[in-house]
């Protein structure tokens, strides 16, 4: 498989120009390379594009991760929080993992595995659809689509 086709597997890893210039964050590169490596291993090279959100977008969507936006707090048991926010005039849920020195690498690996599993299950009706992720945090965050079912 050529490097060009591997790189097309995850469009969010492409370098993007932002208001502040070109993104060169070490977290972005570390998390992105690990995510791409695991995606290639688990998806057999099949393309399943997701969007890469910036930390600024998520901060605006959740009002700087305001505690009033928390919909589920699993920080004690599972080391993550679920935030509700609005981005591009639609409701989203953000799964943000807690960062500590003790669980740094392991938590990052679990978050990346969570992104891959959620991506693979996004076509299922009873699972939240993965819109994308934010790789600029020490531990990547998932951005999920909120679907309201009408009965």
Image (cartoon, rainbow, N blue to C red):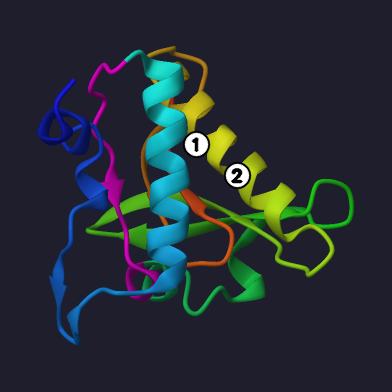
The number of numbered badges drawn on the structure is 2
Residue 39 included in the magenta stretch of the image: no
Look at the image and give the residue range highlighted in magenta: 45-57
Question: 111 above or below 6?
Answer: below
Closest to the observer: 77 or 47?
47
**Residue, far bottom:** 20
Question: In which quadrant of the rendered image does the N terminus lie?
Answer: top left
Main secondary structure along the magenta-highlighted residues: loop
**Residue, far front:** 2
Res 151 visible: no
In the image, taking residue 103 as reference, residue 61 lies left or right, namely left
Residue 146's label in the rendered image is none
User: Circle 1 is placed at which residue position?
Assistant: 115
Q: Is label 1 in a helix, a strand or a loop?
A: helix
Question: 1 above or below 62?
Answer: above
Neighbours of disc 1 within 10 Å: few (<14), some (14-19), many (20+): many
Tell me residue 132's x, y (percent): 35, 44
Residue 51 included in the magenta stretch of the image: yes
At 18% from the left edge and 62% from the top edge, which residue is drawn? 15
Res 60 visible: yes
Tell me residue 54's x, y (percent): 33, 66
In the image, taking residue 120 as reference, residue 54 lies left or right, namely left
Tell me residue 19's x, y (percent): 15, 84
In the image, taking residue 18 as reference, residue 93 lies left or right, namely right
User: Circle 2 is placed at which residue position?
Assistant: 111
At 60% from the left edge and 44% from the top edge, which residue is drawn? 111
Tell me the CA gap for discs 2 and 1.
6 Å
At 72% from the left edge and 60% from the top edge, which residue is drawn? 104
């Amino acid at each position: 498989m050529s490097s060009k086709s591997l790189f097309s597997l995850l469009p969010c890893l492409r370098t993007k120009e932002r208001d502040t210039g070109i993104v060169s964050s070490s977290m972005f590169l570390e998390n992105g390379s690990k995510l791409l490596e695991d995606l290639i291993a688990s998806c057999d090279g099949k393309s399943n594009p997701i969007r890469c959100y910036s930390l600024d977008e998520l901060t605006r969507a959740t009002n700087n991760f305001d505690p009033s936006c928390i919909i589920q707090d699993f920080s004690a048991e599972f080391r993550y929080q679920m935030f509700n926010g609005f981005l591009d005039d639609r409701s989203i849920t953000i799964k943000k993992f807690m960062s500590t020195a003790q669980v740094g690498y392991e938590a990052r690996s679990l978050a990346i595995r969570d992104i891959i599993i959620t991506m693979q299950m996004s076509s299922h009706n009873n699972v939240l659809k993965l819109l994308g992720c934010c790789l600029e945090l020490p531990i990547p965050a998932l951005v999920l689509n909120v679907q309201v079912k009408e009965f």
